[in-house]
Amino acid sequence: MWKGRFEGETSDLVRRLGESISFDWRLYAHDIRGSIAHSRALLRAGILSIGEQAAIEAGLLEIRDEIARGGFAFSSDLEDIHMNIEASLTARIGAAGAKLHTARSRNDQVALDVRLFCREETEAIEGALRALQGALVEVGARHPDTVLPGYTHLQRGQPVLFAHHLLAYVEMLDRDAGRLGDCRRRLNVLPLGSGALAGSTIVVDREAVAEELGFDSVSRNSMDAVSDRDFVAELLFVLGLLGVHLSRMAEDLILWTTVEFGFVTLSDAHTTGSSLMPQKKNPDVAELTRGKTGRLLGNLVSLLTILKGLPLTYNRDLQEDKEPLFDSVDTIKLLLPVIAEMVGAMRVNEDRTRAAAADPFLLATDIADYLVVRHVPFRQAHEVVGKLTAFSLREGRGFPDLTLEEFRSFSEVFAADVFGLFDVRNALEARRATGAPSPDGVAAELARWKTRLAIA
Ligand code: ARG
């Protein structure tokens, strides 16, 4: 695009290595938005005439529409989106186009574009995340009485409401949404005006540009601003952790759909068959969710690795920030709606959850609590119920099938009312503290989430 001090041609191999247009074309609308704001600042600074600025703005809008329509011919000789647009503008409007890059470098330009991209995407992702929360809340609300075992170490622990289990994911996703918001707030700073690294002798009103582009403030150090990609790293972390949450949820669903658990059945639309085994119905969506989390985490590590050795300020290594960023954004935007759809369409097999929740050993802790209320120290109560459990297993009879005499042979404190414990409903109703899975508590949480997510 410019020859200047160069006499020789760039090697074709270098061109292939160095081009970013094949992926950074996606920044075109952000680039044009930034350039229009910059041209207005140049007008106010007396660098552009009204006519020149108007020609630039019209030319840029024309290019934007052409790219949106798919009618723009990108050239890899022009390396990146910034040069493709600028060259095309100058070809269209002549000398005025060649003035646009005054008081600006691609270093502050690309930093601006990437911030605008991230800001927009955090909003879109937050919307998709809220929709998934909504799907989970709705499924929970459709099954308010479904009980299933809660697990630790993947061993049956204590009974919980199915809705309580789903709401655990709603809470995780809420923290993810909070982190997206934090990330957006911190990245919403205008880098434009930092120039290559040391600002410019042509002074433009950066505050006005910030205002026009919706930034909360302007960067305070030009060297930091052109080399800072913390906001990309933060976003990749937030998306990575969100992926980890989705992957954990996927793992629960994969387990629940096995014949061994059988708690839920996924719809045909969200499962696949086996090319060999005709009986199979595989939870591929959940598996791909779990698998794609690998690339989300890889993208974060890629970027941190790119950043760790960079001296101030801009280095071309930074061009490598975009593919991990785009990939994580695309991956999450692909996953969130399909998971929401799958969760919304899954069937809960109440006979299986009920049978699993009827396991009397789930109430072992409740028996210990029974003794505690009757003044047996918890450690002693734990020991008593441990022995009782061993006895019950040996006998092949669950707690409800033991006699009062048998109970009393382990502790004199047991009385006939111990049999009142063996009702899962009672066991849940007793768990009344905030955050615990009593039916009333879970109903209140579902209602609170419905209000927060504006679900009818
Ligand atoms: N394509 C480059 C990138 O993404 C734009 C900035 C290039 N700046 C430079 N001084 N070569 O980082």
Image (cartoon, rainbow, N blue to C red):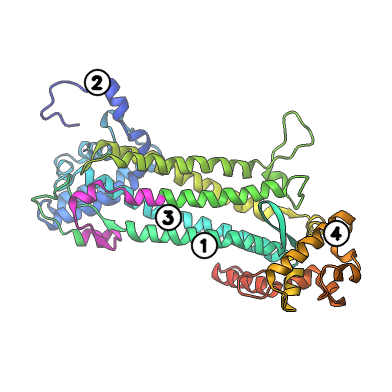
* Type of amino acid under label 1: Asp
Report the residue marked by disc 1: 174
Q: Nearer the viewer, mark 4 or mark 3?
A: 4
**Can you tell which quarter of the image residue 146 is in?**
bottom right
Secondary structure beneath dot 4 equals: helix
Quadrant of the drawing holding the C terminus: bottom right
Q: Can you give x and y, in whole percent of width and height, for residue 42 in the image?
A: 15, 53
**Which disc is residue 159 wearing?**
none
Q: Which residue is drawn at the image coordinates 33% and 56% (left, top)?
A: 187
Please tell me which residue lies in front, 345 or 230.
230
Report the residue marked by disc 2: 11
Secondary structure beneath dot 3 equals: helix
**N-terminal label among 4 and 1:** 1
Q: Which residues are magenta?
A: 208-235
Quadrant of the drawing holding the N terminus: top left
**Which disc is residue 122 wearing?**
3
Q: Nearer the viewer, mark 4 or mark 1?
A: 4
**Disc 1 residue crowd, few under 14, some 14–19, many 20+, Cα 10 Å:** some
